[in-house]
Amino acid sequence: MRFISELFCLTAVILFSHVVNADQNEFKINAEVIDYDPSKKIISLDGMISMTSDDFQISGTTAMISMNEEVIFIEGNPARINLDNPEKIFGEAKQIKYTPAKEITLIGEAVLRTPNGELKSKKILYQLGGSN
């Protein structure tokens, strides 16, 4: 049974790999529950969640990764995101929407720290500098 679980996690990582930058070496997902819907190309995560790569770390309690839309939705109390590329950014909020290389939306008790300062609000929309 453990082999099937590890195989599923590996498959989920491979399927999600096109969402993150191609130059990243490693991407890991840890969660208590991982559910993949191949018809919708959606990965749902539940429990203590952490997603890490060379350029970011994300944590929370529930998440959804849409491979069609190339977006990560994560919730927590708070959910957190740390980015190192294209910019050094730390964010936390009740809900986070992350579109790699485009934008971060923080909703609910939102805090965003960049090298230029800190923002606090109910909702923050931040355009990433390396957007296409």
Image (cartoon, rainbow, N blue to C red):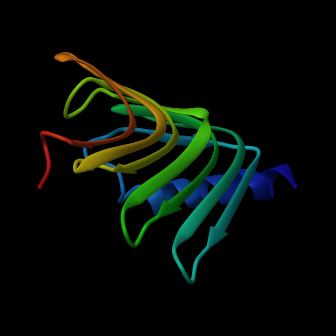
User: Residue 1 at x, y = what percent?
Assistant: 88, 55
User: Residue 66 at x, y = what percent?
Assistant: 47, 65
User: Residue 85 at x, y = what percent?
Assistant: 24, 32
State left or right for residue 58 relative to residue 131. right
State left or right for residue 8 relative to residue 96. right
- Report the number of numbered marks: 0
Residue shown at the point (13%, 42%) measured from the top left = 130
Q: Which of 30 and 124 is in front in this view?
A: 124
Residue 67 visible in the shown view? yes
Q: Give the image quarter of residue 127.
A: top left
Residue 21 visible in the shown view? no
Residue shown at the point (19%, 41%) measured from the top left = 128
Residue shown at the point (55%, 69%) measured from the top left = 42
Q: In this view, does 67 lie above or below 109?
A: below
State left or right for residue 58 relative to residue 24. right
The quarter of the image holding the C terminus is bottom left
Residue shown at the point (33%, 32%) measured from the top left = 55
State left or right for residue 125 relative to residue 16. left
Q: Is residue 77 above or below residue 39?
A: above
Q: Which of 37 and 17 is in front in this view?
A: 37
